[in-house]
Image (cartoon, helix red, strand yellow):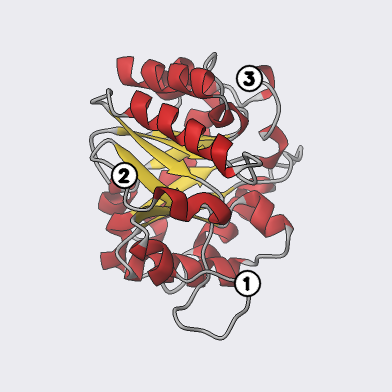
Amino acid sequence: MSKKKKLIVANWKMNPASSAEARVLFAKTKRAGSTLDKVETIICPSFAHLALFAHMGTTRVSLGAQTVFWANSARVTGEVSPEIVKDLGVSYVIVGHSERRALGESDEVVAKKVCAVLKEGMSAILCIGEKERDADAKYFELLKNQLKNSLAGTARKSLLGLIIAYEPLWAIGKSAREAMSPRDVREMSIFIKKLLTDLYDPSIAEAVPILYGGSVEEGNTASLLAEGGIFGLLVGHASLDAERFTRVLKTANAL
């Protein structure tokens, strides 16, 4: 993980439908990302397609996984261990995405996964975010507990591989018009840094990169990165269109 380059993460979720489409999308995205010197592009395919791109990362384009199990060599059917994805050349793992949490993944499980990913020497992209914003601003307390509990057991020395992705659920999967404003994103970035300061210290808060995810498109990339106080972006649907995602990457690189 480069501390200087912006991190732009492509989360493909359960897309594309075929390996042929996945190969084309990966090739186009890698080609675009390989030309940029101020951005690290992280491509996170589904597990079904991950092995297609084993060890195909470069210094500018990295391979990521969308989740992982919290232990190696466990007798757990249907899961994938940290050592397996690492062996494929994976450098980053998304942990605790809102869609995983909606399926029942608890803070306790997320914390175990964060520790397992970091122990293997990969970077953990820890996702946190509120479902909705209440008038009493109780979501601040929710985020505080979510972050604290999701980092339970993580040693301070391991935090160099940690990335926080703030993804408000109410802003995901919509259009750029419904994404958070850069001003609000900056407010949350400051809040997360304060939480990290309280949990650890100011040096950790400064060192841990913060990403934003939630209806990120080429139209709001510049404003979010320039004014949001963040280090990069977690991109969903826009990453499935190579031309659109290339514009996101080039916009980020130009800043």
- Mark 3 or 1: the one toward you: 1
| Dots 3, 1 in contact, CB < 8 A | no
As shown in the figure, which amino acid type bears the numbered disc 2? Gly
| Dots 1, 2 in contact, CB < 8 A | no
Q: Secondary structure at mark 2?
A: loop
- Residue at label 3? 176
Relative height, residue 59 to residue 54 (above, below):
above
Viewer-proximal residue, 66 or 129? 66
| Dots 2, 3 in contact, CB < 8 A | no
Q: Position of residue 67 (x, y in %)?
A: 53, 59
Give the position of the C terminus as an image quadrant. Answer: top left
Mark positioned earlier in the residue sequence (3 or 1): 1
Quarter-wise, where is residue 170 in the image?
top right
Which residue is at 29% across, 29% downward?
34
Q: Is residue 213 visible?
A: yes
Measured Cα–Cα span from mark 1 to mark 2: 26 Å
Q: How many marks?
A: 3
- Residue at label 2? 57
Relative height, residue 73 to residue 200 (above, below):
below
Viewer-proximal residue, 142 or 246? 246
- Residue at label 1? 78
- Most extreme residue toward the bottom is 75
Label 1 environment density (alpha carbons within 10 Å; few <14, some 14–19, many ≥20): few
Q: Is residue 152 left or right of residue 137?
A: left
Q: Which mark is residue 10?
A: none
Q: Is residue 194 visible?
A: no
Q: Secondary structure at mark 1?
A: loop
Viewer-proximal residue, 212 or 229? 212
Measured Cα–Cα span from mark 3 to mark 1: 35 Å
Label 2 environment density (alpha carbons within 10 Å; few <14, some 14–19, many ≥20): some
Q: Position of residue 234 (x, y in %)?
A: 50, 37
Which residue is at 37% across, 17% downward?
250
